[in-house]
Image (spheres, coloured by chain):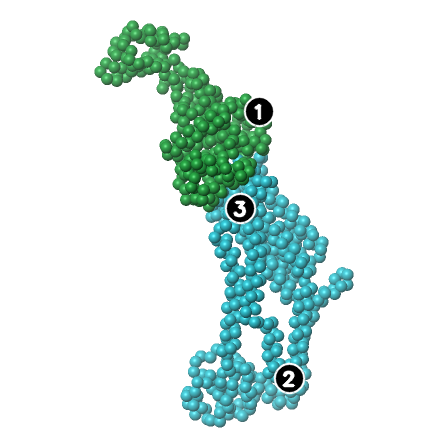
Amino acid sequence: MDALIAKNVTKVYSEHKALDNVSLTIPEKTIFGLLGPNGAGKTTLIRIINQIINSDSGEILIFGEKLKPNHIEIIGYLPEERGLYKKMKVGEQLLYLAQLKGLSRKDAMARIKIWLEKFEIKDWWHKKVEDLSKGMAQKVQFISTVLHEPKLIILDEPFSGFDPVNAQLITEKILELKENGSTIIFSTHRMETVESLCDHIALINKSKKILEGPKKQVKEQYRSNTFLIEHRGNHFTLPSEKYEVKSQTRIEEDLFSTTLKAADGIKGNQVIKDLIDITEVYSFQEKLPTMADIFIGLVKADGDDALRKHLQEV
Amino acid sequence: MNKIWLIIQREFLTRVQKKSFLITTILVPLIFPAIIGVLVYIMKKEAESAKADTVQVVDESGKFVFENTKRYNFVPLSLSIDKAKDAYKQTKDFALLYIPPFDINKPEGMVIYTKENPSIEKVGGLESILQDRIRDLKLEAYKIDKETLKSLKVSINLKQINISDTGEEKSSNSGILYGLGFVLGILIYMFVLVYGIQIMQGVIDEKTSKIVEVIVSSVKPFQLMLGKIIGIASVGLVQFTIWIILITVLSSGVLGYFGLKMPQKQAMEEVVKQVGDEDVKQAMDQQNQQINEVLGNLSQIPFGKIAFVFVFYFMGGYLLYGALFAAVGSAVESMQESQQFQFPITLPLLIGYFGLFMFILRDPHGPVSFWLSIIPFTSPVAMVGRIAFDVPTWELILSMVLLIGGFLFTTWIAGRIYRVGILMTGTKVSWKVLAKWFFMKS
C-alpha cells in the first residue's frame, strides 16, 4: 500500500500559485526525497499534508484514506522553522508535545525515557531548553517528532544544526525507523543526503512536479551513455559515427583520462572491446548523473530536452 | 476538546510556577495593608506626641479672654511687649502673641513671635480663634446675643430615597455608589489590559521561538488561540482571588492590631467624655443616626448581584479584548512592532475608562452612560461602574447579550487573522495585510 498519494493538489495564494496540480505517490516503508529550490512549493505541500493549511483543490490519501483530522496522530512533523518552549523543561516539553499528538501521559512518559536513553541524555529531563546548545535542542526536537511512533514522518532539513557526529546519529535513527516500518518524507537541499538515503525522489520546481520515481530509475532515465576511461597513450582514433570524445586530460606522463560519449545502442562491453584493440585500458566506468546534476540541470534548464543537453555537457 | 484542555493546563501551569507570579501574588496584597498600617501608625504616634503648644499672650486691647484648647495653651502676661519679648526668648514656649489696642471694625497690628517658622496650620488655628472672638464682639456691638446666634446655625443632610416603578422606596447613598463604581470600573480596565498584553506576549513568544508550526501540526490554530486565552484568564482569576482574600484578611488584621473603631465614633466619644454637654450628646445621636443610615444603605446595595455582574463583565471584557490581543500578537514579531496595533484596539477600552469618570459616575442614567454601558467594547468598564446605581434589568440583559455576541465576533475575526499570522514571518504587517489575511480562505 502507498503511504501517501497526492492527486492534482493545487493551492493558490492571492499573488501566486504555490502548488499547481501536483500529484505524487509515496510508497510505504521508503525514504522519499522531496526536492526543489527555495520557494518551489515544498513547504506548502508539507503543510497541506499536516493539515496546517487546506488545499484549494485535489485530494490527499494517507494509507488509502482521505486526509482527516485524526491523521495527525500518525504523522510526525519536523518543520524547517522549528523551536521549543524556551522556559520549559525538556521532560515536560516532550510530555506536552506527545500528549498533543494523542498519547496518554503514561505511555508518553515511558517512551520519553526510552528515547532519552537512546540518545544518552537521560539526565536532561529537568534541564530548561534555554540552557541547551543548538545541537542539543535539535536532539530534543527530533525525539518530539518521533515519540508517538508515527507511520509517516516528515523531516524538513533535518540535519541543519547538527555536527557531523550527531548527523550520523540521526541518520542511524532514521534508518532504524524505516526498518521498523515507518515511511519517511525528506525535504532537503543537501544532495549527498539524497544520494545516500533516499529510495524515491520527486522534484518540485515553480509549483509544479517535474520529476518523480525511484532514485535508481531516475538516474537510469538520465544516463547519457557516457563513459569515463583511464588509459595509457592517446594516439588512437575511434570511428566518429559511433563515438564522440567529450574531453581528455593528462593525469601523468602518458596516462590519460577520457570522457567518451557512445552513440545510442552501444553498450559498455562494446566500448571496452573497441578500446582494448587500440589502447591500454586502466579503468573503465559508466558516468551516471549525480542527483545534484539532475537537480541543477532540471531547475536551471527548465525542460527535459534541455536537461539532457545539460547532462551531456557536465 | 481534550487538546484545548492540555493547552489551558500548560498555559496555566507554566505561568503559575514562575517566581514572578509568586512574588506579585504575595507582594501586591501586602502593599495595601502595609500602607494602611504605616499611615495608622504615624497617625497614632502623632496623636500621642501632640501636646498643646504654649502661647504667651500680651493683650493690650483687653478684649480677649482666651480659653485653653486641645491645641493651644494660653498664658496671659501683663508685661509690656518689649519685656515680654525678652522673657519669651528665655522660655521654650511655642509663640508670643501680641495684640495691640484696636478698633473692632479695623483689627490690625497683631503680631506673632516665634523661634522657628511655624506651620501654616498652627498660625491659621490662632487666626481663626482671633477671628471668632472679633466676630462675637461685632455681634455684640450689633446687639445680637449668643442664643439668637446659636439658633441661626442650621445643618441639613438630605436623605436620599429612590422610588422604583413598583412604588418601593429604597434609601441610597451616592457617595458609596460612586466609590464602588469607581473601584470596580478601574479593576476591569486594569485586568483586561494587563492580561491582554500577556496573551499577546505569549503568542509572540510562540511565533519567535518557532514552536508554533510544531504545535499547529497537532492542533488547530483556533484551539491553540482559545487555549491560551482561557489559560491566561484562569491565571488572572486565581491571582485575583488570592489578592482579594489576602487583602481582606491582612487589612482587617492590621486594623484589628491597632484596635481601631470607626473614626467618627471614636472622636465623638472622646468629646462626650470631656464635656458631657447636652448639645454634644444630641449631636452625637444625630451622628449615630447617620452612621446607621450609611450602614443601612450598605446593606441595601445588592452585593450578590454586583459580584455576579462584575465577574461576568470581567470575563466578557477579557475575552473580547483577549482575542484581539492574540490576533495582534500573531501578526507581529516583537512587542515593539505591536505598538502600532495596540493603541487602536485599546482605544475603546480607554473611552470606556474616561467615560466612567466623565459621564457614568456623574450621571449614571444619562444617554452617554446608557450607550457606553450597552456597546460591547466599552460596556465591561462602563456597566460595572454603573451597576451600583440600579440599572434597569432590560438594559443589563441587553448589554450582556451584546457582550457575548461581541466576544464571539472578535474571537471569530481574531481566529481568522491568527491562523494566517502565526505562520507568516518577515512580512511587513499593516492594516491592509491584516484585512487580506482575514479574507483569505483556509
Q: In the picture shown, does residue B319 fall above or below A182?
A: below
Q: In the picture shown, does residue B85 fall above or below B118?
A: below
Q: In the picture shown, does residue A182 fall above or below B430?
A: above
> Most extreme residue toward the right, as rendered?
B166
Which residue is tagged 3? B11
Residue B277 tag number: 2
Q: Residue B113 appears at what percent x and percent y?
A: 45, 85
* Left or right of residue B203, residue A227 in this image: left
Q: Are marks 2 and 3 in contact (CB under 8 Å)?
A: no
Disc 2 to disc 3, C-alpha distance:
66 Å
Q: First in sequence, mark 2 or 3: give its number.
A: 3
- Residue at 23 percent across and 14 percent down: it is A254
Q: State which quadrant residue B350 falls in.
A: bottom right
Q: Residues within 10 Å of mark 2 (few under 14, many from 20)?
A: few
Q: Which chain is cyan?
A: B
Residue A64 tag number: 1
Q: Residues within 10 Å of mark 1 (few under 14, many from 20)?
A: few
Is residue A118 in view? Answer: yes
- Residue at 46 percent across and 93 percent down: it is B80
Residue B377 tag number: none
